[in-house]
Image: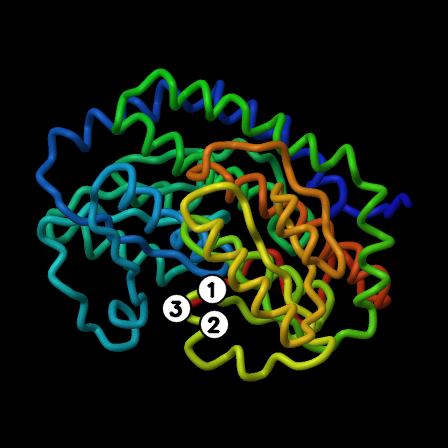
Amino acid sequence: MVLVSHLEQEIFAQPAILERLLRAERGRVEKIARFFDRREYHTLFVAARGSSDNAGRYANYLFGARNRRVVAMATPSLFTWYKSPPDLRGCLVLAISQSGASDDIRAVVAEGKRQGAPTLAITNEEKSPLAGEADQVILLHAGQERSVAATKTYTATLLALAMLSTAMRGTTRDWEALSRVPGAIQSVLERKEDFPRQALFYRAATRLVVIARGYNYATSFEIALKLTELAYLTAEPFSSADFRHGPIAMVQERFPVLLLGPRGKTSGDILALAQALTGRGADLLTISESRALRALSTHALPAPSPLPEWLSPISYVVPGQLFAMHLAHARGCPLDHPRALSKVTRTV
């Protein structure tokens, strides 16, 4: 099926964009890592909104597990509406914004600089207000994003974060792993014909939960966002742990659950939850390399070729993007211009 949309074009452009990002920004990222190594900070203080906020959730696991840094998510309203920002001494302020135009994110960076904290922006817009405010900038090189729903800028942001983490660790082996990310995404795109058929099964759904754990906790949020903004259904993200603490009570016969199960430290927990959900009659849609998990599934979406767990969120979001796109098409929703949304959302 060919969907003539900017959304589809941007989803399929991701392997080339990520290859370009690796080539263009590695040197700059390594310099930035050395710059921050000379500064005294113990906490990464992340300011973001929307899809960028989901990238911040990835940063929480990435820099916590691999760089042993404390990661805290900013509350921008404290800087704007309440005029009561926290003490940012000992923090590196990391602002993530595709457009670089959100006033509240820029306010966090400005306050960080006022307090003497080092500041870093990750953005797709070199001439944006945010890029002009921060001490250091990592550019995404994703080109203009014409579809309202962010896809290529999201995966580019995750890759930029992974590059920074790797530069802080300084290991050649990790850079080699990063070079395999575009190919892992391409392996999903090559199975594009599987997605329209799977989307048809869920055309009448009104709600759905998306569950993951660990590094891919962020992926559950991003896929849920894409399903909500593109296909107009209520999609709620959960960690597998939090889902057991109450929300599992909503699951009954044929209740749709999208479960993410990449290889890694949490795969056993995801499999155990899948067994519990099938026992309750859930309609289980999975993205996983695991034969055991796929065997429990009602339906399964193509999974990307394997990557180390810390990189899997970059590739595992792509089946969710494709599923959301085809589900929106099946439901008659506009792909490039979801109702009530615009490409740049300015918040204060």
Q: Which residue is mark 1?
A: 240
Front-lying residue, 278 or 56? 278
Kind of residue sitting beneath label 3: Val
| Residue 131, percent from left and from top | 37, 41
Q: Answer yes or no: do the residues labelled 3 and 1 have beta carbons within 8 Å?
A: no
Q: Quadrant of residue 249?
A: bottom right
Q: Which mark is residue 137?
A: none
Q: Which residue is mark 2?
A: 243
Task: Judge depth for marks 3 and 2 and give the one in front.
Answer: 2
Query: Can residue 221 be seen?
Result: no
Q: Is residue 242 left or right of residue 111?
A: right
For the residues labelled 3 and 1, the Cα–Cα distance comes to 33 Å
Q: Answer yes or no: do the residues labelled 2 and 1 have beta carbons within 8 Å?
A: yes
Kind of residue sitting beneath label 1: Ser
For the residues labelled 3 and 2, the Cα–Cα distance comes to 32 Å
Q: Quadrant of residue 199?
A: bottom right
Q: Answer yes or no: do the residues labelled 3 and 2 have beta carbons within 8 Å?
A: no
Looking at the figure, which quarter contains the N terminus?
A: top right
Q: Quadrant of residue 123?
A: top left
Q: Is residue 190 left or right of residue 259?
A: right
